[in-house]
Image (spheres, rainbow, N blue to C red):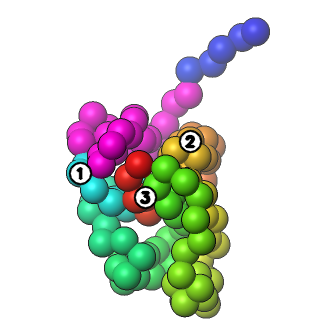
């Protein structure tokens, strides 16, 4: 089997995660976070919809990581994001991190809003 190194052109992948934190580009972010091509910051969770709406037109897919287990996001949140034109994919946070990194390596316009495990 041939292994190829993944290259991220102008993007910073999610390096890792653990109880209560994520590591992006070697920097630790405590608690929930939002990351995209232009940067990473903290996120206030499902009630903090404004930074997610600001992604409309900037990203094609928003991954929402629900922590260690997959869970439904509030229906009102999904409806608001989809009405704004955002594609929303909900999964547990470890899967969201992996999927985000894969699509990021392909040069796709993606973002991830993640609740820590």
Q: Which mark is residue 114?
A: 3
* Other-residue count near label 3 (Cα within 10 Å), few / some / many at <14 / 14–19 / ≥20: many
Quarter of the image holding residue 70? bottom right
The earlier-in-sequence mark between 3 and 1 is 1
Q: Residue at x 76, y 9 (%)?
A: 1
Q: Residue at x 24, y 40 (%)?
A: 27
User: Farthest residue toward the top?
Assistant: 1
- Say which element carries label 1: strand
The earlier-in-sequence mark between 2 and 3 is 2
Considering depth in this image, is 81 or 9 the residue closer to the camera?
A: 81
Tag 2 residue = 98
Whether the residues at callouts 2 and 1 have beta carbons within 8 Å, the answer is no
The reply to whether residue 95 is in sight is yes
Q: Which residues are magenta?
A: 6-28
Considering depth in this image, is 62 or 67 the residue closer to the camera?
A: 67
- Say which element carries label 2: helix
The reply to whether residue 109 is in sight is no
Residue 16 is one of the magenta-drawn residues: yes
* Other-residue count near label 2 (Cα within 10 Å), few / some / many at <14 / 14–19 / ≥20: some
Q: Position of residue 83 (x, y in %)?
A: 61, 90
* Other-residue count near label 1 (Cα within 10 Å), few / some / many at <14 / 14–19 / ≥20: some
Quarter of the image holding residue 15? top left
Q: Position of residue 32 (x, y in %)?
A: 33, 60
Q: Residue at x 28, y 56 (%)?
A: 31
Image height check: is 114 above or below 47?
above
Image height check: is 8 above or below 78?
above
Q: Which mark is residue 30?
A: 1
Tell me how far mark 2 sits from mark 3, CA to CA: 12 Å
- Say which element carries label 3: strand
């Amino acid at each position: 089997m041939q292994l190829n190194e993944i290259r991220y052109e102008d993007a910073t992948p999610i390096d890792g995660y653990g109880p209560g934190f994520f590591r992006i580009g070697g920097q630790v972010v405590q608690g929930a976070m939002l990351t995209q091509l232009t940067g990473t910051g903290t996120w206030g969770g499902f009630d903090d919809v404004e930074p997610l709406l600001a992604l409309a037109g900037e990203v094609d897919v928003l991954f929402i990581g629900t922590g260690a287990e997959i869970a439904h996001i509030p229906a009102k949140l999904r409806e608001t994001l989809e009405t704004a034109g955002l594609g929303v994919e909900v999964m547990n946070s470890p899967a969201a991190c992996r999927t985000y990194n894969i699509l990021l390596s392909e040069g796709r316009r993606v973002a991830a809003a993640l609740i820590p495990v």
